[in-house]
Image: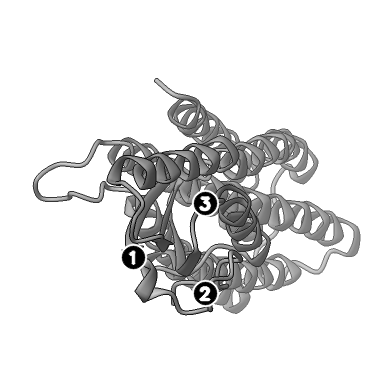
């Protein structure tokens, strides 16, 4: 089992533990704000389950039905998670409205705050692990899970402060107002998750700095070739698909041109995370830039 899957299973265990703790805090207090916090933890569990399934599926090797692999499963998972987060936000908003119409006092608020704070600290630490590991492993599912947990931490801090204000002021309707603010934050975080991952399903190009790195590597290791053009790249989960045209002298042997391709592929694999490289070799009459060795800057749309 690789690191991404181990972290995904760890996330599921943490999410279940946090759900139990926050559910207990709500049971102690009856607070609508703490209920909203606990409900968001239900989505955390669903997110963790989706991440486990998506990472396992994305790492399956190519087959007859999916010859380019299953890398995009993580983007699909992240978008489903974003939709679930929005559903949770709408549910919290509904509970906040009902609580606003019929406000009630909070039971054992200090104990509820203490219990909820334990879960918040756990989420804060684990969100850091998820985002850091997800970025290093190029896993959209882990990064989206981590960002959702981080959003949960922000809302949890707001809930704790809000419940404290209810206790200090005695204004019970504040409990529902805070729950409504949590709902708006949850809705926004769900939209952000969907927006950030939709590009992966549409074959978006890598970030500008990664495109520059790809072009620099190709330029450095395409010595003996006449020209490189038509460089394209796209991210698909942990993989980066790269393709370009390599123009070589017409008299060059197949073996020699193949050696240049091998050198380019090796250089890209040494510097990038899981690149999948396709090189189309062409004779010199296909040159576009008059024999320049610098590759053309062009990214996939």
Question: Callout 2: helix, strand or loop?
Answer: loop
Residue nearer the viewer, 87 or 59: 59
Q: Which residue is found at the position 65% from the left and 41% from the top?
A: 127
Q: Is residue 41 above or below residue 61?
A: below
Q: Which mark is residue 18?
A: none
Q: Which residue is mark 1?
A: 283
When asked about the image quadrant of residue 25, the answer is top right
When asked about the image quadrant of residue 108, the answer is top right
- Counting residues from the start of the chain, the first of labels 1 and 3 encountered is 3
Residue 33 horizontal/vertical position (percent): 65, 59
**Quadrant location, the C terminus:** bottom left
Q: Which residue is mark 2?
A: 298
Residue 183 in view: yes
Residue 254 horizontal/vertical position (percent): 28, 46
Figure colour scheme: one colour
Instruction: Determine whether, in the image, residue 163 is placed left or right of residue 25.
Output: right
Question: Callout 3: helix, strand or loop?
Answer: loop
Q: Which residue is found at the position 57% from the left and 69% from the top?
A: 192
Residue 289 horizontal/vertical position (percent): 53, 78
Q: Which residue is mark 3?
A: 224
Please, which residue is most extreme toward the left here? Answer: 64
Q: Are marks 1 and 3 in contact (CB under 8 Å)?
A: no
Q: Which residue is found at the position 56% from the left and 51% from the top?
A: 223
Cα–Cα span, label 1 and label 3: 13 Å
Cα–Cα span, label 1 and label 2: 21 Å
Residue 30 in view: no
Instruction: Determine whether, in the image, residue 144 is placed left or right of residue 103.
Output: left
Residue nearer the viewer, 29 or 215: 215
């Amino acid at each position: 089992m690789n690191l991404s899957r181990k972290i995904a299973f760890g996330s599921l265990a943490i999410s279940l533990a946090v759900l139990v703790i926050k559910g207990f805090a709500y049971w102690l207090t009856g607070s609508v704000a703490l209920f909203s916090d606990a409900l968001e933890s239900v989505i955390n569990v669903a997110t963790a389950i989706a991440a486990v399934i998506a990472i396992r599926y994305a790492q399956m090797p190519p087959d007859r039905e999916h010859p380019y692999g299953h890398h995009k499963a993580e983007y699909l998972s992240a978008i489903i998670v974003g939709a679930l987060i929005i559903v949770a936000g709408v549910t919290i908003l509904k509970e906040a409205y009902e609580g606003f119409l019929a406000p009630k006092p909070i039971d054992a608020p200090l104990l509820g705050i203490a219990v909820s704070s334990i879960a918040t600290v756990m989420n804060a630490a684990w969100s850091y692990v998820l985002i850091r590991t997800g970025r290093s492993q190029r896993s959209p599912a882990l990064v989206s899970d981590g960002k959702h947990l981080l959003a949960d931490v922000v809302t949890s801090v707001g809930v704790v402060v809000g419940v404290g204000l209810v206790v200090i002021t005695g204004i019970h309707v504040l409990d529902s107002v805070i729950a409504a603010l949590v709902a708006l934050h949850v809705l926004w975080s769900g939209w952000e998750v969907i927006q950030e991952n939709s590009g992966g399903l549409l074959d978006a190009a890598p970030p500008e700095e990664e495109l520059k790195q790809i072009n620099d590597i190709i330029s450095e290791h395409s010595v003996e070739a006449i020209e490189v053009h038509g460089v394209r790249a796209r991210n698909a989960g942990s993989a980066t698909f790269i393709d370009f045209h390599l123009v070589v002298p017409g008299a060059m042997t197949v073996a020699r041109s193949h050696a240049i391709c091998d050198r380019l592929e090796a250089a890209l694999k040494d510097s990038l995370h899981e690149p999948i490289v396709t090189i189309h070799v062409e004779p010199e009459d296909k040159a576009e830039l008059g024999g320049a060795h610098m590759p053309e800057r062009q990214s996939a749309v």
